[in-house]
Amino acid sequence: MTDELNRIKQKVERTNKHSAFTFLIFLVISTAAWFLVKLSEDYVTQTTFRVLMEGVPTDKWVSSDEQSVKMSLNIDGFHTLRYKMIREPNRFVSIPLNEVPFRLENGNTYSFSSQYVAEKVAEKLNINASDITMNDAKVYFTMDALKSKVVPVVLQSRITTERQYDIYGIPMLEPSSVTVFGSQEVVDSIKMVRTELLTRDNVSQSFSATVPLDLLDGRIHSDVKKVKADVQVEKFTEMDVEVPIKMTDSLKMRFFPETMTVKCLVAMRDYTSITPESFTVSVDKQQLKAMQPLLDVRLASWPPTVQILSTRPDKVEYLIVQ
C-alpha cells in the first residue's frame, strides 16, 4: 500500500514539474511575442541632436561651431530602442560646410536646409530621412570674415648627426611662407609660423621630411597644413684660416699681428674654395679715434656654411703709416 502511494506521489510531482515547465515556455514565448508586436509598432520621439560645423572656409570663422537642432523621430520600436541606446554626448552629427550649400541671410548670419541634418541623423540611426520631421526648416549660424597675413615659416628641429657630420647651411622649406587667417588680435601678434618639432638622430646623409605647422591649437587657420623641409648633411673637417687685418678706408695702418687666426669647421666639398678672402675682420674705429694703444678686432663676416670655432687675437697693436 505504501509503495503504491509513493508511486502515485512521484507521478503527480512529475506531472506538476512538466506543467510548470510548459507554463514557463509559453510565458517566455508570449512575452517575446508581445515585445515583438510592441517593437514593430511606430512611435513618435522628440529629440535634440547637436550639429557640429566642419569644413569652414579658410578665410571665415564660425563663432559658434555647434548648434542644437530639435526634431521628431517617427520610427518603429526597434529603431527607437537603438536611438535610446545612444548616449547623450554621442547624439551629434557633423555638417561639412564645404559640401553643403549655405546662403547669406543678412549681415554675418548664414543658413542651410535642416534636411541635411535629417539625412545625417538618418544615416546614424539607419533609418529613412522621411522618418524625421525637423522642427525648423533651416539651421542658422554666424560666420565672420577673418583677417589674413603672409608670414614666414620657421623650422623647429632637434637633429643630431654622426661624428664629423653636420647640417650644411639652413634647411630649405617649401613653401617658405604661408597665409594665415584669424581674429585681428591674434593675427596682429603673429610674426612667423613655426613647424612642429622635427627630430632625427645620428644622421649622416641629407634627407627630406614633411612637417606639420603649429597653428596655435586652432587659433589661426591656413590652407597650408604642412611644409616640406630639405636638410643638407655633409661631412665636415677643421680648418685654420689666416685672415688679414685691414682698414677699409684710406688710412694706412699696420697691425701687430697682421692676421687673425680663424679656426672653423668646413664642409669637405667646400674645403678648396674657402680662402682668407672669404672672411673679413673689423677694427674698433672709436678706439682708434681715442688713440687707445690696443684696438678690439672681431670677425665681421664669413660664409654661411662655415661654423666658427674660435678666433685669435681679440686685440691688436697698430702703427699709423704716414
Image (cartoon, helix red, strand yellow):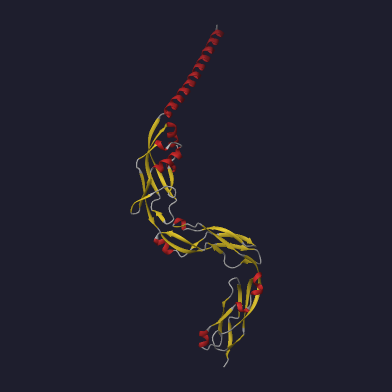
Nearer to the camera, 147 or 6: 147
Toward the left, the furthest residue is: 106
Q: Position of residue 185 (x, y in %)?
A: 40, 62
Judge left or right: residue 136 versus residue 14. left
How many numbered circles does the render carry? 0
Toward the top, the furthest residue is: 1
The part of the image, by quadrant, that contains residue 298 is bottom right
Q: Position of residue 139 (x, y in %)?
A: 37, 46
- Looking at the rendered image, the quarter that the C terminus falls into is bottom right
- Looking at the rendered image, the quarter that the N terminus falls into is top right
The answer to whether residue 187 is above or below residue 65 is below
Q: Residue at x 42, y 38 (%)?
A: 129
The part of the image, by quadrant, that contains residue 302 is bottom right
Judge left or right: residue 55 versus residue 305. left
Q: Residue at x 50, y 18 (%)?
A: 22
Q: Position of residue 287 (x, y in %)?
A: 52, 85
The answer to whether residue 14 is above or below residue 262 is above
Q: Position of residue 77 (x, y in %)?
A: 42, 31
